[in-house]
Amino acid sequence: MRKRVFLKSPILNLQPKGTKAKPYQVQQVRRVILKYKLAGESDEP
């Protein structure tokens, strides 16, 4: 019998273009970007 592994993916509710995100939504997206290292290279030293 094979074992199945289910990985939990983050679910993000993004705002449509032109609307403002709530502070908790910004924190959620930032947390995922940092966790999965999705940010591009920084210009900062």
Image (spheres, grey):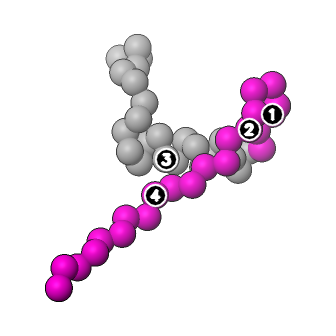
In the visual, does 2 lie left or right of 27? left
- The residue that mark 2 highlights is 15
Distance of label 4 from label 1 (alpha carbons)? 24 Å
| Residue placed under numbered mark 3 in the picture | 32
Residue that badge 1 annotates: 20
**Looking at the image, residue 8 lies above or below residue 2:** above
Q: Quadrant of residue 11?
A: bottom right
Which residues, given as a range, are shown in magenta? Answer: 1-22
Dot 4 and dot 1 residues touching (CB under 8 Å) = no
At label 3, the amino acid type is Val
Q: Secondary structure at mark 3?
A: helix
- Identify residue for label 4: 9
**Three-letter code for the amino acid on which mark 2 is drawn:** Gln
Q: Residue at x 47, y 40 (%)?
A: 33
Q: Dot 4 lies on which element?
A: loop
Residue at the spot 60% in from the left edge and 49% down from the top edge:
12
11 within the magenta span: yes
Q: Secondary structure at mark 1?
A: loop
Please name which of the two marks, 2 or 3, marks the residue nearer to the observer.
2
| CA distance separating discs 3 and 4 | 10 Å
**Can residue 18 be found in the magenta stretch?**
yes
Residue 13, how many percent across, how many down?
A: 67, 48
Query: For the residues marked 2 and 3, what is the alpha-carbon distance in whole angstroms?
Result: 16 Å
Nearer to the camera, 3 or 14: 3
Please state the horizontal and vertical placement of residue 42, each as a whole percent of the image: 40, 20
Sequence order check, earlier mark of 3 and 4: 4
Give the mark nearest the N terminus, 1 or 3: 1
**Residue at x 55% of width, y 41% of height:** 30
Q: Given contact means CB atoms under 8 Å apart, are the residues at marks 2 and 1 in contact?
A: yes
Q: Where residue 2 sits in the image (x, y, percent)? A: 19, 79
Crowding at mark 3 (Cα within 10 Å: few <14, some 14-19, many 20+): some
